[in-house]
Amino acid sequence: MQHNYRKMNRFFVNKKNINDNKIIITDKEDIKHLSKVLRIKPGEKIEISDVEEYEYIAEVVNISNNHIEAEIKEKSHFNREPAAKITLYQGIPKQGKMEYIIQKSVELGVSEIVPIFTERTIVQNKGNFDNKTERWQKIALEAAKQCKRGIIPKVNEALTYKEMLEDMANKDLVLFLYEGEKERKIKTVLQNNCDTKQVAIIVGPEGGFSDSEVLLASDRGFVSVTLGKTILRTETAGAVAIALVLYELEG
């Protein structure tokens, strides 16, 4: 049975609101969007993800001010989530660029995004980022809905460079994107690590990394790689690296 997935809207619902045959939507923003913006009527179908394992085709059966009830018609495991879990550690760029980076990274298949303060990050005050993290997470949510991800990639609280170094313990492979690397290509490294399931990609802000940061990364055993002969913008480099990782590891 073929569905027109382009026209069906996707929503994320906590697993506790899903039973054997029904789904209850209680998120106020989703209720408003469904009833007021999309003007969904009983009998119409929507897509639901439980954010953990399953996605559903469900038919709306009841709409009220505080919940929407839908009947499950189909259930399946996620079919768009990559097996490789990619965490993007992104040097915080100038105003506005982070939103673009998050949106494109989510579309491509990243699992997690961690903003990092580096020596060349223009804004150094972590206190200014309380509201930004919340806004960035909303951008990740909207991007996940748009491209029909199974999960909502998490945007973590910003870390300092040294905090980032400590955060690498559970990663199988750490790719340090460095414009000074001339020999080691990301493609070669990935082909030599084709069974890797946890990948970290580290991208610097405008201006790249300082010499001391490069040295610290090298001391930790991070693999510095080049993406090619040209120097990419910070908002481009992460997206290119994510695409290459998934191409090599998912192929």
Image (cartoon, grey):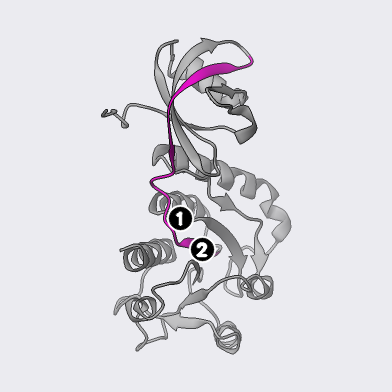
- Closer to the camera in the image, 27 or 93: 27
Residue 16 at x, y percent in the picture: 64, 32
Q: Which residue is mark 1?
A: 101
Residue in the picture at 38% in, 81% down = 192
Q: Is residue 136 above or below residue 204?
A: above
Give residue 148's quadrant in the image: top left
Across and down, in percent, residue 222 comes to: 53, 82
Q: Residue 77 colored magenta?
A: yes
Mark 1 and mark 2 residues within 8 Å of each other at the beta carbon: yes
> x, y percentage for residue 108?
39, 54
Q: Secondary structure at mark 1?
A: helix
What span is colored magenta in the figure?
A: 66-90
Which is closer to the viewer, label 1 or label 2?
2
- Circle 2 residue: 88
Give the total number of marks visible in the rendering. Answer: 2
- Give the mark nearest the N terminus, 1 or 2: 2
Decide if residue 16 is on the left or right side of residue 182.
right
* Three-letter amino acid code of the residue under disc 1: Ile
Q: Residues within 10 Å of mark 1 (few under 14, many from 20)?
A: many
Residue 194 sits above or below residue 63 on the image: below
Number of residues whose C-alpha sits closer than 10 Å to that of mark 2, classed few (under 14), some (14–19) or many (20 or more): many
Residue visible at 57% across and 32% down in the picture: 13
Q: Residue furthest front?
A: 20
Give the quadrant of the N terminus.
top left
Assign a secondary structure to mark 2.
Answer: strand
Q: Position of residue 227 (x, y in %)?
A: 35, 75
Label 1 vs label 2: CA separation? Answer: 10 Å
User: Which residue is more in the foreground, 95 or 50?
Assistant: 50
Tell me if residue 20 is in the magenta stretch.
no
